[in-house]
Image (cartoon, rainbow, N blue to C red):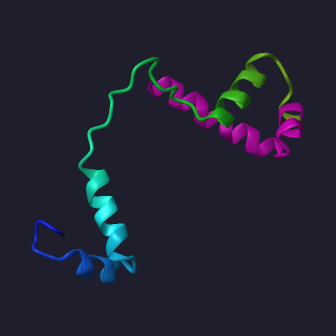
Amino acid sequence: MLDDGLSHEEIAWRFRRSPGFVRRVTVLSGLQRKPRTGAAPHPLRPVERVVHKGLAQGLPTSEVASRLRRTPEWVERVDAFASHKLNQA
């Protein structure tokens, strides 16, 4: 929007923010980020890893559900989605 010639004040008004906020975002958006070093991110979310690992260790669906305070049907859906994600990776 700045490239289109709008002022910080106009942008702030459109987003219901202060002009100072818009200036800070503008400055931060121009900063260079350090590249990630270390291991690649895991394809599964933490809860998906817990469900998948528990079932892989032979725990019954009801036990995993009880530990996570969810229903067994939820655990089955999460595990199916986790398996799908791992097969796609």
Magenta highlight on residue 66: yes
On the image, the x and y values in percent for residue 16 come to 39, 81
In the figure, residue 38 lies in which quadrant? top left
> Is 42 located above or below residue 30 in the figure?
above
Point out the stretch of residues depicted in magenta.
63-89
**Residue lying at 11% horizontally and 66% vertically, measured from the top left:** 3
> Is 73 located above or below residue 62 in the figure?
below
On the image, the x and y values in percent for residue 22 come to 31, 68
Between residue 73 and residue 38, name the one nearer to us.
38
- From the image, give the main secondary structure of the stretch colored magenta: helix
Magenta highlight on residue 33: no
Describe residue 74's horizontal placement relative to residue 24 as left or right: right
Describe residue 58's horizontal placement relative to residue 5 as left or right: right
> Is 26 located above or below residue 47 in the figure?
below
Image quadrant in which the C terminus is located: top left
Between residue 86 and residue 47, name the one nearer to us.
47
Describe residue 65's horizontal placement relative to residue 77 as left or right: right
On the image, the x and y values in percent for residue 78 come to 67, 39
**Residue lying at 26% horizontally and 59% vertically, measured from the top left:** 26
**Residue lying at 16% horizontally and 68% vertically, measured from the top left:** 2
On the image, the x and y values in percent for residue 71 come to 83, 46
Image quadrant in which the N terminus is located: bottom left
Between residue 85 and residue 16, name the one nearer to us.
16
**Residue lying at 10% horizontally and 71% vertically, measured from the top left:** 4
